[in-house]
Amino acid sequence: MRILIFNWRDIKNPSSGGAEILTHELAKRWVKWGHHVTLFASLFEGGFSKENVDGVEIIRKGNPDARHLFNSVHFLAYREYEKNFKGKFDIVIDEVHGLPFFTPWYVKEKKIVLICEVADDIWIKMFGGFFGYIGRITEIFYLRLVYKKIHFITISNSTKIDLVKNGVDRKNIKVLPMGINRPKNVKVLKKENNPTIIFVGRLAKTKGVEDALLALSKLKRWNNDVKLWIVGRGNSEYEQHLRDMVKKLSLENAVTFFGFVVENKKFELMSRAHALISPSFKEGFGLTIPEAGMVGTPAVVYNSPGLSEVVINHKTGLVCNKNTTEELFRNLVKLFENKKQYRTLRDGAIEQSRQYDWQKTANYFVRIIENI
């Protein structure tokens, strides 16, 4: 098959996240199986306009923010389709992150939507009142009308429920089983001497990093030696805001920003930490949770869509009853103080991680495409 993917970012984009990992893990396997895959995504500073990554042809143009209008990746995807893509592919995957590429309006080939989460009230949190309401209204419009007859693939039952609530026909939605990366020579290492928690992900307001810092401030009063490792990258302004917050809370000696790290380093840090923390307001899945589980590190998460679906409460990690920093603090203390429960959570997290396999994910997706 000849597969075309429209996505706002690709795996090499500095702001890429779990969705881009998913997309690339699928695409590179499809290439190995004999399919041709082209990914059209936004251009970033230092990135090439054309690049081949693991056999996937990547073309980059425009800005990921739709507010750039005619220079947005969404508009330029339409232009590129009309000039170079039309009639050359068997199927087009329209990957949605807040806004879709509105492929039903111009793509003649078979189409399918890949969506990790329905943004809903995240629009307001990210863009404020004016642009936030415009985004939310647009989301309701395209889900109920533009994509009414299009097939959807998502990554969790909670997102499926959100899609149905927003007008998508339940019969048109498939839930994709997820996978995780398993680098060679990854080991379960000895935990740090001091209580250590780790955040891994894109640094963005919706990910709850600020709540992690506030919970850490409370933890310091419980044990002054507790540490927080922050692994990931994001908008430079927001990262500076987090660093300023660390200073304001007098946490300079407790917080380490690692930025972007290679896979083996990421798993090493996860293995050495006692707990993964994920106080995100909303997630499609929560890829880092089974990754940390694979190296014996249970998670403490907010009771948010996606996260509470991945973590089995009191078996593979702890899910907060309320999404507050006080509740986050209390659950982390429970994790550190109850050694018997901690061993149970570690064993459960390791066992659960074994069910995730990218080969199964990619194969399932191809079968859906073939049926369409």
Image: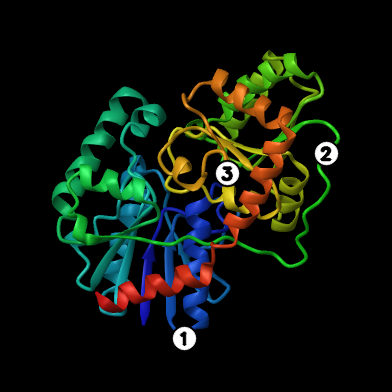
Q: Label 2: few (<14), some or many (≥20) within 10 Å? A: some
Query: Which residue occupies 48% across, 71% down?
Result: 360
Residue 88 percent coordinates (x, y): 31, 80
Residue 105 located left or right of residue 351: left
Residue 15 appears in view: yes
The quarter of the picture where the N terminus appears is: bottom left
According to the picture, the residue beneath numbered tag 3 turns out to be 315
Residue 50 appears in view: no
The answer to whether 201 is drawn above or below residue 182 in the figure is above
Q: Amino acid at mark 1?
A: Gly
Residue 94 percent coordinates (x, y): 32, 60
Q: Which label sits on residue 34?
A: 1
Residue 99 located left or right of residue 346: left
Q: Residue furthest front?
A: 340
Q: Amino acid at mark 2?
A: Glu
According to the picture, the residue beneath numbered tag 2 turns out to be 192
Q: Quadrant of residue 282 in the image?
A: top left
Q: Do the residues bearing badges 1 and 3 touch, measured as CB atoms within 8 Å?
A: no
Q: Amino acid at mark 3?
A: Lys
Q: Secondary structure at mark 2?
A: loop
Q: Which badge, 2 or 1, is on the more N-terminal residue?
A: 1
Q: Which label sits on residue 83?
A: none
Mark nearer the viewer, 1 or 3:
3
Residue 42 percent coordinates (x, y): 45, 55
Query: Which residue occupies 45% across, 71% down?
Result: 362
